[in-house]
Structures are given as C-alpha cells and as structure tokens.
Amino acid sequence: MRNPSYPGIFASGVMLSVMLCTLPGLQAQQDLPVQVLHYADLVLYNGKVLTADDKFTIAQAVAVRDGKFLALGDSATILRMAGPKTERIDLQGKTVVPGFCDPHSINLLGGVPAGGNALTWINDNMFEVGADSVDDLLRQIKRAVDSAKPGEWLFFGLPRNVATYQLNRKLLDTVTPDNPILATYDTTQALVNSQTLSLMPRDVKEGLFVDDQGEPTGHIRGWALGVLEMEVLPYPDDKRMEEMIQAQKEVFRKINSVGVTTVGSRAWGLSLTIVAELYRRAELPLRLRLTHEFGRQNPQMERYLKRMGNFMDLGNEWFKIAGATSTVVDSNPGNGGLFTRSPKRQRLPGDAFGPTGQDKWALMFQEEDGWKKEFQNTVLLGRYGWNVSDMHIIGDGGVELMVSAWDEINKTRPVRGKRFGMVHGGIRPPDLAKRLAQYDAALSLAPAIGFMGKGTEQAIVTQYGADQMAALHPIRSLIDAGLKPVLEVTNFMLGFGATTPIGQRVKKLATGRAARVEDAGGENSVAWNRYGNQFYMWNLEKFITRRNEATGKVWGPGERVTRQEALWMGTNWASRFYGDEKIVGTVEPGKLADLVILGGDYLTAPEEEISEIPVLQVMVGGKVTYEKPAAAAAGTQ
C-alpha cells in the first residue's frame, strides 16, 4: 500500500496567508477583514486519515474551512492553521475515512420501498398475508377487510407463490365487496378487485390481464399497475404527509449513522415530494441523489419526456436529480426470480417463474413479444438525454437485455461516460463484463445478496450451482475488465422496511412457511439488529473475505478485493456513480468535508474483525450529523 509522506501540504488559501504575512508593508493577518482570510474552522490531528484518493494517501491530520477540506499534512503543520476560534479534535490515533457514498437505497417513504409498492401509507390498512392455498389467502384477506370501514382502501403484500397466481378478481370480490383492494406480489404485479378496476382510466389496457372470454382476471401488471399506483391512488392528507416526512427523516438518520454521507435512491412522485420537503426545511442529514421513476411502468413515456423536458443533474451539493429509470428487469434469488440465460439446475418449492426466472419486461404484458414495448421505453429515455441508471438486475439474462438496450441508445447518443448503471450485482460472467466495460457502466454490488445468511446462499447453490455462487459478485474480474464497481449497503440495511417507521406498522397475518420474508429482507433486519451502526463496516469485510456470515463458507476467493479497493468501492469509486467525483468521495483540499471517524484501525484490524469497528462520528460539510453515545463508544481505540 502506497503511503506518500505528507510533511506539510497547504491549500491555496493557507499559502496566500503565509505570503501576505511575510511581505513587508502589509498589515498583520489579524488586521485583515475576515472576508479576505481566516483560520480553519476545524482541525483533526494525531490520527490516521485515509484519504482514499487515487494514490491512497495517508496523513496525520486534516483542516476544514467553510465546509470543505482545506489541507492535509502532519499534525504540527495542520495545527498551525488553527486560530482562537478553531475547533480542535485530537483523534488519539483513530482512523478517519471519507464519508461513504451509497448509490442505491430503496428506503424512501419512511422505509417502504420506493416505486411499484402498494404500501404507500395512505392509511394504516396495510397487511402482509401469506399461505400456500387460495382458501387460506382469502381467509386472511377477509380478516383484514372485516377490520376496515366500507369504502376504505386496503393494501396487501402477497407471497410470490402458485397460490397467489391462482387467485383472481371474482374470488377476491367474494371477501371484499365494499372496499377497493390493491394486493401486490411483486413490484410490477398485483391483484385487484372489481372496485379498484372501476377506478382505472378507460384508455389503460396494457397490463390488465384477461381470461379466455376477455374478462379481467384482476391480475394487473406493468404499465397498468404503474398508472394505478402513481396516478390513481389517493394522495395523503397533510397530517399523513407530515407523518411520512418525519418517518423519512428517521430513516435517513439511521442511514447516516453507519457513515453514509451521500445516498442515492429511485424516487417517484410521492417519495420525491417527501424528501424534497426535508431539503427545503434544511433537515437532510446527508446528501441525496435521486433517480426519477417517471419512466417506470409508464404507457405514455414519450409524451412524458416531451412534456417534462430533461432536468437531469439539476440540483446542488445536497439534492440532485441524477438520472431516470425504466421498469426493473428481474427479481431476487430467494424466490427463483433471477432472469438468467441458462435454466435453473433445480427449481425451489413454490417457484412461479419458470426455468430461467422472472423477466419482468415480458411478464408485464399478456402478448408474447410485449417485452419489446418496455425495451423501447428504455431506449427512449436514453435518446432524450437521460442516463438510465439504478436498474435492479441480478441475473445475467437481465444484464444482457439491458446492455442490448444500451447498444440501441448508443446508435444515436453515446452511452459511455454517461453513468448508465445497474444495482445489486449478482451473476456477471466475463463476456458481459467486457460489454459493461465498453460503456464504463456504473455498477453497485451488495454483499447482503449471498454473504448474509444461509437462505440466499442455499437458494443460489440449489438453483444455479456452487460454481455460480462462487462467481457471484465477481469484483476482481470486473476490476480487471477496467470497471470500478461500487459497494451497496443501506438498500438492505433495514430489512425491506421491517425495522423502519412505516414497515413496523404493517400488520402481519401470514403464518408458517408462506409468511417467510424474502431471504435478503429477513436476514438484513437481523443484521441491523446485530451490527447497528457498524453495518457498513460489515459490508466492507464481506467483500474482503467473501465469507458467508451464517455458514462460514468462503466463496470465490479469487474474486476478493484488498482493503484499499474495498474502501475505494465505498468512497472514491462510489462518488462516480452519480457524477460527484469532483466534490465528494475522497479527503482532498477543495472537496466537501464529509468524513467518518472510526473506533478502530481499518488497515490493521484482523479481517474478521473489520465488522466490529464502530462508527464514532459522522460529519457532512464539516458539521457533526451523527455521534455515537459516549457509553456505547467506551473502550474503542
């Protein structure tokens, strides 16, 4: 590891100070107006500052002024930049790293996944149901309906199994005669009753599934579901909106507590409104980068593009619209939903998605070649100048489909260097790595998928084989192909809403095996309860060791990364995901003073103990946004 000496590097303002004070005839520094020159606002010294710059420079101390890093160097040099009002922090050997940049977190709406999810907290009639038979599902739904007033909306989360697909509108109507119902079993698929269907615009046909007689089955997907969720559902009243704003603030506080100072997310109309209000109130504890979902499940894509115009990258250092997304491509390994090029070796019990998993673009439409419509929507986004990013794609079939859309966009607009990207990681074979490198793709990878608990590990091994589990998240191969992959953490930190303000208000009616939360969500809520604000450090450890938390197995040791590379994935390289590499991601003079003080030595701690290193303090723009309680921090280095 390169560790250049830093005997005393001054920022331009400090050099000017020295020159002014040594030139004859000039007034002493204390006589100069404060607008011309002033001391550092903050100095941190006597520590180990890992700058995470391209050379991985290490310094003893850092100075901050006006919310930006002023200078780096040895402690004696940096302390000379302190004045009477400068705050001094003696690190006592502690490690400082740049604030972490997390490109993808679905924890908007106070913890309910953003976009394509029915549980939008319009009211408290939110239920999780689950069973292996249609009769049991209907009994659970009836219990919920009996507790509601006539006319009230009810929202359900259904299991992704065969029983859900066997349900239909007529059966649902028998237990929901007086209430509109929306029961989602996927971000692009849901079941509704006749009351809900009556509220749909008459010109929306794509995604309203019908039987052999042309009658609506109640299964509603893709474009039709997008219209229902984002345009038809009632909007929260002021009281509910304020509850959602406060819930969102609490979620951001938790995300910030693990060291994240910039977070990205997909956002549709309601979630964008909520976080924008926090920005207007100056109550954001971190920087926010949003990928707008106006293009998701949208039957009128080109009309929207023309009407709205392109406002990508408009914003500031705190809040920015960083791109747009079309409909996500596949699902998760725990339910058989990865869209893969090769068939599964063995299907899981209750797998409703077939040999090659779930291609959501195809499942959205009843006709055989309907996927081409969503493919064209994605191409339109790119051709109108939007970068298509933040796309959920785990299987290699989904990667190939998305890169093919990029190929089409690239015929008229260059894709390389435009931050087109995918999230979650997963199956990325060498031939696709080369195609991704061709476009310098922005890729985030989540250790929680595969290295968190035994459920996801077993699901991947059973369906795709141990060789695919070993090749999962092939970071070393991606780096060797010329890419700079990024660490993805907080998307999984809170267990898909299980430990969030809104998620805690969902009433769980399901029991037994069908009530199982998807592996990643359930495992992650357990991880948050165990690791708390050390959760980011847990993720760094997992890509360094590639050891599954539950089983202890090491998968694909040849794909391990060094500590230096892992830190780059969460800072330097991560800042590129949304085009922020000039302002955050490293501790360098002139960049925004976002930093994390750790309670242990990241570079020397045993690999298996990196996850035990606590986050003691987080600063955004040189201001403390999180500080670990003194009692909890006692005993740290």
Image (cartoon, grey):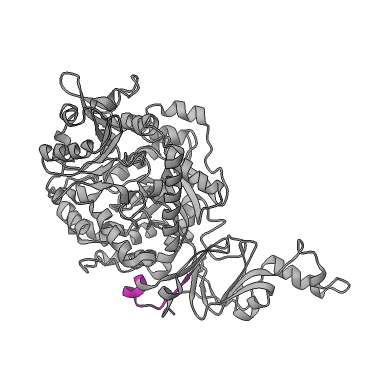
Q: Residue at x 86, y 71 (%)?
A: 26
Q: Residue at x 44, y 27 (%)?
A: 302
Q: Is residue 602 visible?
A: no
Query: To which quarter of the image does residue 124 belong?
Result: top left
In the displayed structure, would residue 370 be above or below residue 98?
above
Query: To which quarter of the image does residue 41 belong?
Result: bottom right
Query: To which quarter of the image does residue 102 belong?
Result: bottom left
Between 113 and 464, which is closer to the camera in this rendering? Answer: 113
Count of numbered circles on the image = 0
Between 277 and 46, which is closer to the camera in this rendering? Answer: 277
Q: Residue at x 48, y 54 (%)?
A: 576
Q: Residue at x 55, y 51 (%)?
A: 318
Q: Is 62 left or right of 519, judged from the image as shown? A: right
Residue 37 coordinates in the image, percent (x, y): 75, 65
Q: Check if residue 603 falls in the magenta segment.
A: yes
Say which quadrant the C terminus sits in: bottom left
Q: Residue furthest right?
A: 25
Instruction: Write the start and end of the magenta stretch as one range.
Output: 597-611
Between 610 and 417, which is closer to the camera in this rendering? Answer: 610
In the displayed structure, would residue 48 be above or below residue 374?
below
Residue 6 coordinates in the image, percent (x, y): 59, 76
Residue 190 coordinates in the image, percent (x, y): 25, 35
Say which quadrant the N terminus sits in: bottom left
Q: Is residue 156 visible?
A: yes
Q: Check if residue 63 falls in the magenta segment.
A: no
Residue 29 coordinates in the image, percent (x, y): 79, 71
